[in-house]
Amino acid sequence: MKENWKKLFKTPNFVVGFVMVFIIVFLMMVGFFYLPYDVNAMDVVNKLAKPDNVHLLGTDHLGRDILSRIMQGARISILIGILVVIFGLITGTLVGSVAGYFGGKADEIISKLIDTQMAFPGVLLALMMIAVFGNNLGNIILALGIMSIPRFARITRSGFMKYRDAEFVRASRVRGAGDFYIMFFHILPNIVPDLIVTCSLGFASAVMSEAGLSYLGLGIQPPTPSFGKMLSEAQNYILQAPWYVMIPAIAITFLVMGFNMMGDGISKVMQH
Amino acid sequence: MKKLCVILTMAMMLTGLAACSNAGAESAATDTVAATQSVEKESAAESTATESTAETESTEPTVVRMNISSEPDSLDPWQSAASDTSAIFDNVFEGLMSYNSEGEIVPGLAESCDISEDGLTYTFKLRENVTFHNGQPFTSKDAVYSYNHLAGLDGEEAVSSKFAGVESVEAPDDYTFVIHMKEASASFLALTIADVLPEGYEDQATSPIGTGPYKFVEYVPGQRVVFEKKNDYYNEEKMGQIDRVEVYIMTDASAIVSAMMSDQLDLANVSVENAQILGDDFDIYNSPQNMVQIFALNNTYEPLSNVKVRQAINYAVNKQEIIQGVFDGYATELYSNFSPVMSVYYNDELSDVYTTDIEKAKSLMEEAGYADGFDLVIKVPGNYQAHVDTAQILMAQLSQININVSIETIEWATWLEDVYANANYQGTVIGFTGKLDPNDVLVRFKSTYAKNFTKYNNPEYDALIDAAAVEMDDEKRIEMYKECQKIITEDAVGVYICDPNLTMAAKKELKGYTFYPVTFHDFTKLYYEK
Amino acid sequence: MRYYARRILGFIVTIFLVSVFTFAIFQILPGDPATVILGVDADPAQLEALRASMGMDKPMVERYLDWVAGLFQGDMGTSYKYQQPVAQLIQESFKVTASLAFVSIILTVLIGLPVGIWLAKNSRKPVATPVSMLSQISLSIPAFCMSIFLIYIFCVKLQILPSFGYTPLNKGVGKWLKNLILPSMAIALGSSAALIRYIYTSINAQMKEDYIKTAKSKGVSMTNILNKHVLRNSLIPVITILGMLVSDILGGSIIIENVFSFPGIGKLLSVSISSRDFPLIQGLVVYMAGIVVLCNFLVDMLYSVIDPRIRLK
């Protein structure tokens, strides 16, 4: 175990990714105890101020301190990323493993459902959730989570199909192991590397999708900041105040890229 | 050149106005004044006329490329209600009467209009030599066809319920058209700007034709609408100078700016912020647009049903902060549901009814029994960033009087149903585009009006606005509308925030962009400076 | 033959499921298409007329059944918003999105394949890390920022490419391509990074297989092994990801089409949703189901071409 950690920190991809994520997480952690300004305090006279020593990252279009909003926005963005991945991972893996392991009718039904879900526009799904259950963080996470199921289900399904007739599975079946035991104690560990990559990609795409939803005016409610919301609010000022757009964009890039590169590193180490 | 052009068209319109004799003695007097003015300007106008004809003789076809933010709702003007659609299609269609940049009703397809003493008969003398874009000549038959349709006199459903007052129409000869009314209505003349369409033409929804100075060429969904100059337009002075106008449907603000910067658009409707970036290389036209941005309150919702609470909110809101923060200062502060653009009807005595005063607001809240405040949800359409930003500022301002605001951004379609149709909301921020008739602007607060989404109910107001609608004496009518504005201000139906400017950026060579009190991009005024 | 029959049956089931689901959503979603189309200033008479002419006055269930009946006769109905046949609207938008998919997939492969293979070959060299990071960056930049960045460089600064609009192919290949380059690039930069990742891992996984070790021990050169065995076997995951990318791009990108004012499927989808255009959404969802199923099918076909051991069953 310790060996693996050492290896990980010798993998350049992992290290770079870790540093990127660490910067964002560090800012978020500090934000729990100290914020330079109230995130919602407006100062319209000082709007779109360039970064200086009063506002380290400048102010937004309503004169709010961008650094403080990034520090608090990280909470929402990271929360969305993590919860969406957990939701997708649990549901997707369950569904995918049943389809892959049992095959036949179960596989056919599940595959049809996954196709259906993929054919279904994610925006429409998010809209429905928001219309029915109200526009709150939980529903955005649920909608993004549902959208991420196929990704996990497909990977798990193909993994289980590959291993269901493998030597070690047959052996344990002969020894009288139950399906459940085989599925989750014999086969699942083998596809963990794939799942880790999928998780990192899933986290990245959840953060990006939140930005996408915000762009369509469907993201989390103002004035609460998230990286996606900040980016979509900033987009109209891209020519007038480029830094205002750059900062949330860089934050998103750090988070997305950081997780992807950490995922790369982990899968590399696990493959060796 | 630009100035002269404007004067020219104004003079033309004013001459027409003089011909339109009104039964009301007072307004007849105003008309005479207008006539004298126009005579003075006539000479200046004539010289401009020759100049502009000389310009159109150039060989190279001139093109103006501009943007519009939404798709036309229908190409058939009778089926269309969106102001973005009429903003460009008013170049294609014309009504019996028309409007000028001052918002006055002036002759269009009718040379003159004669209103009988009792206000029940409108006799229009129609222009001769007018043809539709398919070459068909315009006669009184088309007017009869159009008004039969508009008012539903031909046995079919009426196109618009506003024409319910029409009793019958007739055409004594080819160039005379008469409308008989069930009862007198002061705002009916403004309704006769409704587009007149050719009789027997079935394809309005796909390839619309009218009599206007520009012809419709094509509409590619999601991409563009193209117009071309009508070369045999009957009115030499209102003739377009640009040969072709291409209107591109573009929704992304930064895409519009980059299209301007890379010479792919000549004229664009931009945000104030972006206008500042374009400022050095382009001409920026900036003018109030007769819009009312309102923080509307649901007058039946428990704490808001108390007029003191609504007044407290009015005292707590600092409109200047919103104008600075959201519109960069390019907006006109409002005091009632009326923009000063409509100067004739505008009540200018309301500016000091509410001045930002937190102490006063607090004491009003206390009197109303809400010293500790209450929770308020503001529903805003999420795709209008300006309204969302306004709500965020309101949130901060209202927290000073202990009102705990939370914002709920909703989709436009949801807003229309939940807020606008069903009044299922507490507070909302929205902007209403300008209208020519003050009745259309103020009727929103009449209790029986179908879309009275504030649920304001004041019998006194209802009676006044009804009386104004049938008051044929202009002066009295103006006073009544001013009184209406005063009532809704004092009753604090909502917070009337501002009239945000319409900002247009144009290439330096492209001149002549003219603002109207309704959303209208007049292609005929545009020209390239040599 | 039975194989194809099953596939087609599966397709019908998928369409049925998505359309029922869409229908269910429309039962719940607030918003009236006529009001959205005509806006706040709509006259009640106009609203009535529009509803009647578009059949919106009928109950939702009846409209859905009409739509299903129409579909069996090859009629997808008429859009509320555009008042044009849905099939025609989708066809027009499809031409745009398909052009975009075509150019961006070519760009994706042109960038992704060589870089991916190069990275796999040189994974031990120090240059590999910055290259893989560079590809990661393009995957991590939000689509909106990427698009604006490209527009700024190529349209505003260099003024060599148009920043918006679409020119049909019959107006000339050059013009067509000019409009397509930037949005395709915005898509391809991200998707090629994903492709690079998959190629890289796939080749690495293959290299550890026993047959490579055998070949190595026999003294076959590394380049030969790579070209003759590894590449062919690593193609399978590459095709899988390409299939997913194609169906993704053909599904339309709302953000990219919005920024480039591109009248494609994504634009049509966002308009249809915001105006509650039921027939149009139903049509688009059926279209998407068709694309997903077709792409899956083509991917399976390609599998069996590349590796004859994989049978279509």
Image: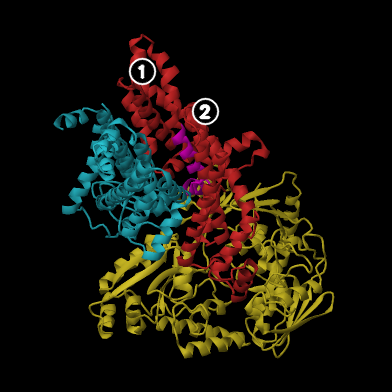
Chain colours: A cyan, B yellow, C red
Point out residue C80 in the picture as x, y percentages from the top left corner.
60, 62
Point out residue A248 in the picture as x, y percentages from the top left corner.
33, 47
Tell whether label 2 touches label 1 (CB within 8 Å): no
Q: Which residue is mark 2?
A: C305
Q: Secondary structure under badge 2?
A: helix
Q: Which residue is mark 1?
A: C212
Given residues C277 and A232, the one toward you in this image is: C277
Q: Is residue B320 magenta?
A: no
Residue most toward the left?
A: A2
What is the magenta range? C239-261
Point out residue C175 in the picture as x, y percentages from the top left corner.
62, 37
* Vertical placement of residue B514 versus C159, above or below: below
Given residues B18 and C300, the one toward you in this image is: C300
Given residues B442 and C189, the one toward you in this image is: C189
Left or right of C283 in this view: B60: right
Q: Amino acid at mark 2?
A: Val
Q: Secondary structure under badge 1?
A: helix
